[in-house]
């Protein structure tokens, strides 16, 4: 495999082929200038993607390959990881299509682990039709947490708006039982490191949302904020982490308080993602922070209701690609800056 001008090699998993994933991928690389930014490999099947691009009238030249060593810079490389045909029915929930979505994803993760690719961008999957005896995960994040080193944290990003989660794909009636000081500490330290090494922010400021309405109103509406969150934040602040809160979640975004912080941590999925998607939907990126490998994805799902109609907006997928490349470059820069200066000096001597 050859690299072009040191460009990162970007791997892409195809997601649910009956959804809009392939459409937003192909629309992104319809602009050939994108291939100047990276070397690309899509994990899928070139015949299937050729069928989809023809059906949607997308002008994107595909280059089929049978081994990752055959990747060519400047081409939309499609690595054939299966040979058989797949019946595409746009907008349909199909377990067979789900099987190929996971095959694409797990093969791409292996390539990321083995450093055949530098970053991974994932197209949306259907969390229901991917379930099988071999894959029993709620989604991408949980599998990545198992396969890569580190502690995964879902971080939604749109420019300077960054929203992380203490818990993600957990039913609401189980969230409180997962909330511990150990969890809070782990997640905040993860996001603090992420902001420093992946976003080049020196001494980041982190806001934490209250778990209960009005942060519990001094215990009147729940004890979690006073008994778990406040002590955890206090100890972290004493250790030098600039973490603040808990803030009443109902007014935090509407009042613009979020603009004062480099990241916001919500207690559970909808507490963080409802305001994030209200402010940034269609331009946001889901970044799996805290892991040894870099993975991003668009902020939307399979969108079956518009699949196959050529109406999908590829902005969020394109932003996911940009962010993955930015983080790759930032990590390289951070590694150089934080390396032992004495060793560098010795080499120069």
Image (tube, rainbow, N blue to C red):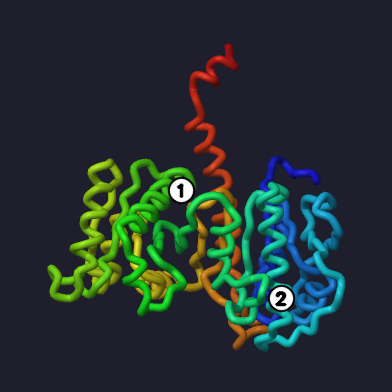
- As drawn, the label of residue 2 is none
Residue 201 quadrant: top left
Query: Dot 2, crowdedness within 10 Å: few (<14), some or many (≥20)?
Result: some
Report the residue at 37% width, 41% height from top: 202
Judge left or right: residue 184 versus residue 18.
Answer: left
Q: Is residue 124 above or below residue 93?
A: above
Residue 272 point in image, percent of width and height:
37, 69
Q: Nearer the viewer, residue 255 or 41?
A: 41
Res 157 seen here: no
Residue at numbered disc 1: 199
Residue 287 point in image, percent of width and height:
51, 60
Q: Is residue 116 above or below residue 123?
A: above
Residue 5 quadrant: top right
Q: Nearer the viewer, mark 2 or mark 1?
A: 2
Residue 10 point in image, percent of width and height:
68, 54
Residue at numbered disc 2: 99
């Amino acid at each position: 495999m050859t690299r072009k001008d040191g460009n990162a090699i970007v791997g892409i998993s195809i997601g649910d082929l009956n959804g809009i994933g392939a459409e937003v991928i192909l629309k992104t690389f319809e602009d050939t200038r994108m291939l100047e930014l990276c070397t690309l490999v899509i994990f899928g099947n070139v015949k299937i993607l050729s069928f989809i691009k023809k059906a949607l009238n997308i002008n994107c030249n595909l280059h089929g390959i049978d081994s990752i060593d055959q990747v060519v810079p400047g081409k939309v490389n499609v690595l054939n990881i299966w040979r058989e045909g797949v019946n595409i029915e746009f907008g349909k929930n199909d377990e067979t299509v789900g099987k190929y979505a996971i095959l694409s994803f797990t093969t791409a993760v292996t390539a990321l682990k083995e450093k055949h690719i530098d970053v991974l961008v994932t197209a949306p999957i259907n969390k229901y039709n991917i379930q099988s005896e071999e894959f029993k995960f709620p989604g991408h994040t949980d599998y990545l947490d198992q396969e890569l080193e580190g502690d995964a944290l879902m971080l939604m990003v749109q420019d300077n708006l960054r929203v992380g989660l203490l818990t993600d794909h957990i039913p609401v009636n189980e969230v409180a039982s997962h909330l511990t000081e150990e969890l809070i500490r782990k997640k905040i330290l993860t996001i603090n490191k992420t902001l420093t090494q992946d976003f080049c922010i020196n001494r980041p400021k982190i806001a934490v949302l209250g778990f209960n309405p009005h942060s519990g109103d001094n215990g009147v509406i729940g004890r979690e904020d006073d008994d778990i969150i406040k002590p955890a934040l206090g100890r972290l602040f004493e250790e030098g982490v600039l973490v603040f809160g808990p803030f009443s979640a109902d007014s935090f975004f509407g009042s613009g308080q979020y603009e004062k912080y480099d990241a916001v941590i919500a207690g559970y999925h909808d507490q963080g993602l409802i305001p994030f998607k209200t402010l940034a939907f269609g331009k946001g990126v889901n970044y799996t922070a805290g892991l040894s490998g870099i993975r991003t994805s668009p902020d939307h799902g399979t969108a079956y209701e518009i699949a196959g109609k050529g109406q999908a907006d590829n902005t969020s997928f394109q932003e996911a690609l940009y962010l993955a490349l930015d983080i790759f470059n930032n990590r390289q820069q951070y590694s150089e800056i934080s390396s032992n200066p004495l060793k560098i000096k010795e080499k120069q001597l």
